[in-house]
Image (cartoon, rainbow, N blue to C red):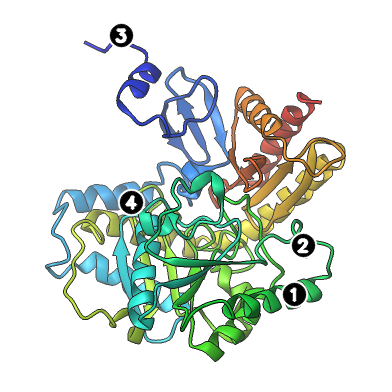
C-alpha cells in the first residue's frame, strides 16, 4: 500500500533543509527517453539540464542500459583490491584521450571526490597546502573543495584545511578587467596572478580552474588565458589542475576537453572528470602524469570507485559518444542554439548576456538596464519554462540569476528550436 503523505512532505521530514529543490511545486521524474523526461503526473519535458550535465548522451540509452544489465548479471562489485577488466579498459581509453603524457587514472564516485583527490595529490607532491583558485569558482561539497570555492552561495564554512588565494580572470564580462580587450584582459589577469604569488609564503601547490565555470553561471575567460597562467606556474613549479567535471567529453563543441582552448603551454598536470562519462551512473576520476599520481607514499584503495557496473556504463557511453561524433553535434547544434538564444535576448530586456559554447549556454538575467542580478526573474523564468515543458538549470555567482542550458549532446536541431521557443515564451511572461 502506498504512503498517502505527499512525497514533498516526506522529503522535508527526513532530508536536510539545505538540500535544494527546484520549483515551487517540486516534481518527481519517473522515466526518460532520448532528450525527454516524464514526471509522476505524466507530464513530458524536454530536458535542457540533463541532471546537472550528467545525462550526457541520452536518457535510457540502449547501449548503456545493455552494458549495465549484462555486467550486473555477472558481478556488481569487487573493489580495487582485485583486477577489474572494465576499469582498466576505461582507464586506458581516458588516459589516451586526456592529452597528458604517461597518464595514470584513478576512479572515484563523483566530481567532488575527484577534485578532493586532485588536491591531495597536488599538496602531497608539492609539500604545500597553498592553492590558487579562481573567483566565482565551484569544485564540490567536501571540506577541502568547499574551502577553494570562490562562490559565497556554495561555501557554507570559512574553515579550511588549505590556504587559498583567489585569482581574477574566469569571468570575462564582470569585475575590474571587464572593459579591457581580450589581450589586455589576459595580461591584467596574469599580472594579478603574479601579484597574488608575491603574497604566498613558500611554494604554492597548484592552481585549480574550471575552463568554463559551471555553478558560477557558465562564465569563461578569453581563450588562452590559462595557457598564459601556465607559463607563470611553470616558472614556480606550480601544478595546473583542470576541473573538467562539466566541460569534458566534447560538451563545448570546439574541444574534447575545456583545457584545449588554453593549450599553448601544454596540457594540465592533473585533470578531473565526472558527470557525463557515466550518463547517470556514479563515475568520477583523476588523470595525472605518473610522477604526480604516484607521489603518495601510503597505501590506498577505492571501495566503490571503478565499480564493474559503472565502468561498463562508462565504456559503453564513451564508445557511443565517439562513434556518433557527439562533440561535433554539440558544435553544430549548440552553435545554432546559441545564435537563436542571442536573437531572443536582443528583444528580452531582462537578459544581460548570453554566453557559452557548444551545448553549454548561460543566460544572465538582471534588472533591465542595469547590472544588478535578478534572481527572482530567473526563478520566474525557470517556473514558466517548466510549465511550457522545458527543464532548465540555474546558477551564477551573482545571486543565482543565470539560466543554465546543457542538454544531452545528442540534441537534434528540431529539439533545439523547440526549447528555444519555450524559453522565448517564458522570458516574455516576465516582461
The location of residue 372, given as percent across then percent down, is 77, 41
The location of residue 124, given as percent across then percent down, is 32, 78
How far separated are the C-alphas under marks 1 and 4?
Answer: 39 Å
How far separated are the C-alphas under marks 2 and 4?
Answer: 39 Å
- The residue carrying mark 3 is 4
How far separated are the C-alphas under marks 3 and 4?
Answer: 31 Å
How far separated are the C-alphas under marks 2 and 1?
Answer: 10 Å
Q: Quadrant of residue 1?
A: top left
Q: How many residues crowd around disc 3 within 10 Å: few (fewer than 14), some, or many (20 or more)?
A: few
Q: Is residue 314 above or below residue 389?
A: below
How far separated are the C-alphas under marks 1 and 3?
Answer: 60 Å
Q: Are marks 2 and 1 in contact (CB under 8 Å)?
A: yes
- The reply, left or right, for residue 69 in relation to residue 90 is left
Q: Which mark is residue 292?
A: none
Q: Earlier in the sequence, mark 2 or mark 4?
A: 2
Taking depth in this image into account, of 323 and 218 the one nearest to the observer is 218
Amino acid at each position: 500500500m502506498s504512503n498517502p503523505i505527499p512525497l514533498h512532505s516526506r522529503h522535508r521530514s527526513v532530508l536536510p533543509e539545505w538540500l535544494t529543490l527546484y520549483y515551487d511545486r517540486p516534481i518527481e521524474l519517473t522515466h526518460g527517453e532520448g532528450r525527454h523526461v516524464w514526471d509522476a503526473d505524466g507530464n513530458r519535458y524536454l530536458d535542457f539540464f540533463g541532471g546537472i550535465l550528467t545525462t550526457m548522451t541520452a536518457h535510457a540509452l540502449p547501449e548503456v542500459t545493455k552494458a549495465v544489465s549484462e555486467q550486473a548479471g555477472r558481478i556488481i562489485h569487487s573493489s580495487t583490491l582485485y583486477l577489474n577488466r572494465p576499469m582498466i579498459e576505461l582507464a586506458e581509453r581516458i588516459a589516451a584521450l586526456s592529452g597528458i603524457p604517461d597518464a595514470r587514472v584513478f576512479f572515484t564516485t563523483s566530481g567532488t571526490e575527484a577534485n578532493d583527490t586532485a588536491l591531495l595529490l597536488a599538496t602531497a607532491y608539492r609539500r604545500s597546502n597553498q592553492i590558487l583558485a579562481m573567483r566565482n569558482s565551484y569544485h564540490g561539497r567536501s571540506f577541502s573543495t568547499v574551502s577553494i570555492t570562490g562562490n559565497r552561495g556554495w561555501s557554507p564554512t570559512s574553515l579550511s584545511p588549505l590556504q587559498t588565494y583567489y585569482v581574477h580572470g574566469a569571468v570575462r564580462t564582470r569585475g575590474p578587467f571587464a572593459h579591457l580587450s581580450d589581450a589586455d584582459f589576459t595580461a591584467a589577469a596574469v599580472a594579478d596572478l603574479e601579484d597574488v604569488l608575491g603574497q604566498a609564503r613558500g611554494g604554492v601547490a597548484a592552481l585549480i580552474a574550471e575552463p568554463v565555470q559551471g555553478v558560477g553561471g557558465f562564465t569563461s575567460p578569453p581563450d588562452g588565458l590559462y595557457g598564459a597562467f601556465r607559463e607563470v606556474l611553470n616558472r614556480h613549479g606550480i601544478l595546473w589542475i583542470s576541473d573538467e567535471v562539466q566541460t569534458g567529453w566534447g560538451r563545448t563543441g570546439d574541444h574534447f576537453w575545456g583545457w584545449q582552448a588554453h593549450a599553448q603551454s601544454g596540457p594540465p598536470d592533473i585533470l578531473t572528470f565526472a558527470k557525463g562519462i557515466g550518463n547517470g551512473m556514479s563515475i568520477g576520476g583523476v588523470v595525472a602524469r605518473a610522477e604526480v599520481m604516484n607521489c603518495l607514499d601510503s597505501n590506498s584503495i577505492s571501495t566503490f570507485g571503478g565499480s564493474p557496473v559503472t565502468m561498463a556504463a562508462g565504456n559503453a557511453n564513451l564508445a557511443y559518444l565517439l562513434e556518433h561524433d557527439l562533440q561535433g553535434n554539440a558544435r553544430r547544434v549548440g552553435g545554432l542554439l546559441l545564435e537563436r538564444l542571442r536573437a531572443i535576448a536582443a528583444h528580452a530586456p531582462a537578459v544581460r548576456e548570453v554566453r557559452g559554447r557548444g551545448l553549454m549556454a548561460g543566460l544572465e538575467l538582471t534588472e533591465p538596464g542595469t547590472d544588478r542580478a535578478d534572481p527572482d526573474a530567473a526563478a520566474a523564468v525557470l517556473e514558466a519554462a517548466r510549465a511550457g515543458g522545458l527543464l532548465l538549470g540555474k546558477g551564477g555567482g551573482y545571486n543565482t540569476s543565470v539560466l543554465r542550458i546543457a542538454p544531452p549532446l545528442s540534441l537534434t536541431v528540431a529539439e533545439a528550436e523547440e526549447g528555444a521557443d519555450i524559453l522565448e515564451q517564458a522570458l516574455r511572461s516576465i516582461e
